[in-house]
């Protein structure tokens, strides 16, 4: 047994295999260059092999990689304090505490367990939105509002009622029924198609949670850490969530996740209530510390806002594009018909990585350090692909 035969078939055969990355570019074994506008699903937000992060990881790997959570290390408290400051908008503190883990699903698992402890098991329901995506573990899959992903693994764990996204009356009706400990929402639904709610939706959810003594848990795994033009997407509306989960961009490719909670909520956990063998280990924390440092120096929220406006405006003028939605550098390109998969394959052949999140929708999530030239190059490649597809249809 060799090659991919030794791998479980949980993924389709890859259309390309990469051996090296640098900034916004990937290279295959033949040396062909590709412009990466999906960033490992919004993970490599500083680009591939960023020298500051690479040097920090190499130095830490030669010093101390792991000691387990039976003992402390110097990096985790520092990274936690930085995240608390960024939750507050970058200045001062938000007055919260952080649990470190290895992924977004684990960060959401932490949040779900924290809800149980905070309510003493009296109100265990967590209201979620249709179309959401919160992870692949059984609990986070049950929270995910995509029935097609549930069916192979039913029965799902109970306690996750779903309501339409961006529908405050539906959310209020479930909360009024009692037994709800929390509402779990994405500020923008990433895997669901980059769906942006109405401007008053999250503020309304905050108000309803306060009225019904439920926690507001915001899944910022894809939107957090600068991608939408703010450190966290909820900051665009000046909200104060109770729990925030994050992962993807935090280690710029090194697996690390985090769950932040207000101190009084975090206090519901005691020693032994939750844990993660690798969570907060020195190697992951070195990557996170270096990543966050570069993000602050480069003002990635500001860069994402400026580059996002340039990218959005250019995409809107391409043939066959019916609309562009999203925020910052998390954008969806809505096409005229269910041709997104074909467009993504053709773009890859032309040297551009994007992905189809819906039959008619392409997602773009480039590095937050993407240059104007790279934005223009990506738009040029996609424009040529869409023009060629339109010409083939008309002949």
Image (spheres, rainbow, N blue to C red):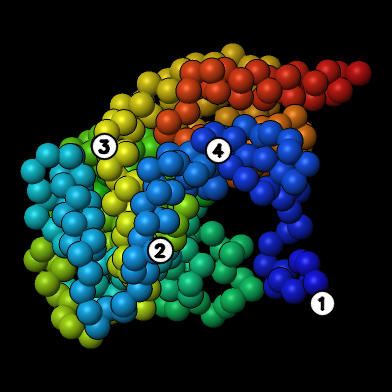
Residue under numbered circle 1:
1
The answer to whether any part of residue 219 appears in the image is no
Residue 92, quarter of the rendered image: top left
Percent of width and height locating residue 68: 31, 79
Closer to us: mark 4 or mark 3?
4
The residue under the point 13% across, 58% down is: 96
- Position of the N terminus, as image quadrant, is bottom right
Percent of width and height locating residue 184: 33, 59
- Position of the C terminus, as image quadrant, is top right
Residue under numbered circle 4:
22
Q: What element carries label 4?
A: strand
Marking on residue 286: none
First in sequence, mark 4 or 3: give its number: 4
Measured in 3D between alpha carbons, the distance from the residue under mark 1 to the one under mark 2, in whole angstroms, is 32 Å
Percent of width and height locating residue 141: 49, 68
Residue under numbered circle 2:
61
First in sequence, mark 1 or 2: give its number: 1
Measured in 3D between alpha carbons, the distance from the residue under mark 4 to the one under mark 3, in whole angstroms, is 21 Å
Residue under numbered circle 3:
296
Residue 178, quarter of the rendered image: bottom left
Measured in 3D between alpha carbons, the distance from the residue under mark 3 to the one under mark 2, in whole angstroms, is 24 Å
- Tell me, yes or no, whether the two marked residues, 1 and 4, touch with CB atoms within 8 Å: no
Residue at the limit of the structure toward the front, as seen here: 62
Query: Mark 1 Cα within 10 Å, few/some/many (few <14, many 20+)?
Result: few
Closer to us: mark 1 or mark 2?
2
Closer to us: mark 2 or mark 4?
2
């Amino acid at each position: 047994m060799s090659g991919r035969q030794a791998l479980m078939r949980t993924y389709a055969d890859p259309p390309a295999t990469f051996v090296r990355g640098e900034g916004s570019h990937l290279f295959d074994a033949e040396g062909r260059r590709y412009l990466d506008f999906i960033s490992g699903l919004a993970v490599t937000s500083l680009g591939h092999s960023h020298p500051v992060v690479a040097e920090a990881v190499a130095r830490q790997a030669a010093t101390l990689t792991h000691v387990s959570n039976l003992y402390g290390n110097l990096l985790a408290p520092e990274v936690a304090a930085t995240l608390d400051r960024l939750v507050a908008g970058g200045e001062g503190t938000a007055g919260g505490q952080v649990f470190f883990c290895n992924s977004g699903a684990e960060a959401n698992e932490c949040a779900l367990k924290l809800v149980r402890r905070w309510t003493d098991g009296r109100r265990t329901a967590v209201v979620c939105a249709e179309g959401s995506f919160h992870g692949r573990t059984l609990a986070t899959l049950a929270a995910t509002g995509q029935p097609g992903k549930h069916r192979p693994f039913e029965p799902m764990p109970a306690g996750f009622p779903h309501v339409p996204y961006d529908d405050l009356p539906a959310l209020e009706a479930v909360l009024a029924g009692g037994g709800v400990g929390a509402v779990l929402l994405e500020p923008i639904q990433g895997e669901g198609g980059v769906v942006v709610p109405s401007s008053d939706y999250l503020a309304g959810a905050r108000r309803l949670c306060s009225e019904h003594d439920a926690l507001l848990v915001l899944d910022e795994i894809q939107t957090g850490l600068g991608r939408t033009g703010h450190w966290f997407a909820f900051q665009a509306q000046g909200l104060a969530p109770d729990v925030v989960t994050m992962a993807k961009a935090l280690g710029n490719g090194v697996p690390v996740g985090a769950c932040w909670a207000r101190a009084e909520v975090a206090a519901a956990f005691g020693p032994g209530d939750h844990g993660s063998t690798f969570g907060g280990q020195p190697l992951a924390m070195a990557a996170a510390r270096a990543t966050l440092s570069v993000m602050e120096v480069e003002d990635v929220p500001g860069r994402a806002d400026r580059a996002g406006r340039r990218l959005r405006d250019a995409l809107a003028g391409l043939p066959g594009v019916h609309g562009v939605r999203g925020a910052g550098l998390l954008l969806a390109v809505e096409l005229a018909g269910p041709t997104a998969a074909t467009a993504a394959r053709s773009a890859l052949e032309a040297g551009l990585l994007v992905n189809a999140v819906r039959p008619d929708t392409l997602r773009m999530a480039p590095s937050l350090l993407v240059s104007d030239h790279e934005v223009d190059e990506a738009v040029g490649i996609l424009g040529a692909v869409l023009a060629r597809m339109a010409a083939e249809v008309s002949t």
